Amino acid sequence: VSPNSIETYAKDKLSVQMVELFEACQQQMSDLTWKERCRAQLQQDIQRVYAAARLYLTGSSMNGLGCRSSDADLCLVLRGKKTPNPIHVLTALQRLFQSVSYVDRTQLIRAKVPILRFKDKDSNLEFDLNINNTVGIRNTFLLRSYAYADLRIRPMILVIKKWARHHQINDASKGTLSSYTLVLMVLHYLQTRHEPVLPSLQRDHPDCFHPFLDVDVIPEGPKHIPPYVSRNQSSLGELLLGFLKYYATDFRWDNMVISVREARAFPKTNSKEWRNKYICVEEPFERNNVARAVHEKIKFNAIKAQFAESFRILRERKDLNSILPVRAII
Ligand code: ATP
Ligand code: MG
């Protein structure tokens, strides 16, 4: 079977609602064109200070999982003899941006990966810029390859991101799940079905996702991956319900680590990445815990409770509106 239309997986009401929400919210070509124009302009302005700097769009703007309302993530790559201090660079950029007419409201955020957050005045679009966090470029193209490996992936993930945001469990700065963590959790669910919906792309195509590929060839690698043909023919609605059920009742949070790299969950070891962590999700390239923001028991319980509650309601009602007010979101 090689169905080439999403309608194949959307014959019931819940699945149709998912496709409709996806089509209404997914990032448009015009959105990406605008982001790309900003990127090029910013790169040109930054090169006045850092002549060899290169700016890359990452995150959901590029990985096929973006909404019209998604921010634009940027990675500034500075190569040199010395590794630059990101805070110093971001402070210099903050000063530079004060003289750049289209940038507004810059804000330096001193997180583990420090970022400069700012807005594009014309579009009010938000940008998050980091320095040399090139793993973000690698995993963006890995996620992009998963997003396009099967027609169901993009609608499924967009709906789940909207669901998580609506229920306030999608904000790493508030101790809940980052979008990136949530996406890896969905991919893991799809990889571990009895008939997998997705394989491990890193296992099947190691050369395309080699962790030392030069940043400029990263986007080229995945272009040669043939589409994955799954024997799993579940509808979108079945997959959404199954995803909620998996994390509400099946997944062993206390002793398992989610690994999209290996397409399985493996037992927690005593290493510091996993020890005393409520949720363990492995970064596919760097092998640290992308869910480390969830460090309060109360937030962890709220996340689990949301999976359980939404599963209970959706199983009963089979209507997307019962867990996500679609009209208010579109
Ligand atoms: P949204 O549409 O909500 O903005 P997003 O896909 O852009 O979602 P974010 O969580 O904002 O997701 O992360 C943006 C990008 O930053 C990710 O796609 C990934 O490339 C990178 N990233 C985020 N968190 C991590 C992490 N813990 N380790 C490595 N890379 C990360
Ligand atoms: Mg983003």
Image (cartoon, helix red, strand yellow):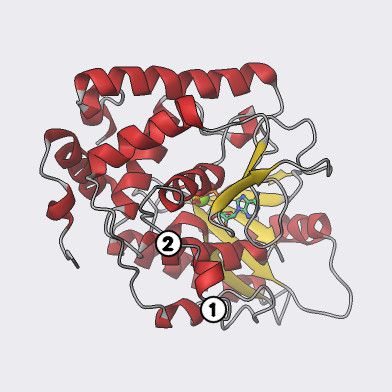
* Horizontal relation, residue 13 to residue 302: left or right: left
Q: Secondary structure at mark 1?
A: loop
* Horizontal relation, residue 12 to residue 314: left or right: left
Q: Position of residue 52 (x, y in %)?
A: 70, 82
* Horizontal relation, residue 277 to residue 124: left or right: right
Instruction: Name the residue that disc number 1 marks.
Output: 208
> Residue 300's quadrant in the figure?
top right
Query: Label 2 to label 1, Cα distance in Å?
Result: 13 Å
Q: Position of residue 157 (x, y in %)?
A: 37, 46
Q: Is residue 321 above or below residue 97?
A: above
What is the three-letter code of the residue carrying label 2? Tyr
Q: Residue at x 30, y 26 (%)?
A: 324
Q: Residues within 10 Å of mark 1 (few under 14, many from 20)?
A: many
Name the one closer to the observer, 249 or 43.
Answer: 249
Q: Position of residue 31 (x, y in %)?
A: 34, 59
Name the one closer to the observer, 37 or 160.
Answer: 160
What is the three-letter code of the residue carrying label 1? Cys
Outermost residue toward the right in this view: 82
Of the image marks 2 and 1, the number of the one nearer the N terminus:
2
Q: Residue at x 36, y 78 (%)?
A: 226
The answer to whether any part of residue 62 appears in the image is no
Quadrant location of the N terminus in the rendered image: bottom left
Instruction: Name the residue that disc number 2 marks.
Output: 146
Q: Secondary structure at mark 2?
A: helix
Q: Position of residue 253 (x, y in %)?
A: 61, 31
Q: Is residue 178 above or below residue 148?
A: above
> Tag on residue 171?
none
The answer to whether any part of residue 84 appears in the image is yes
Q: Are marks 2 and 1 in contact (CB under 8 Å)?
A: no
Name the one closer to the observer, 230 or 45.
Answer: 230
Q: Is residue 80 above or below residue 290?
A: below
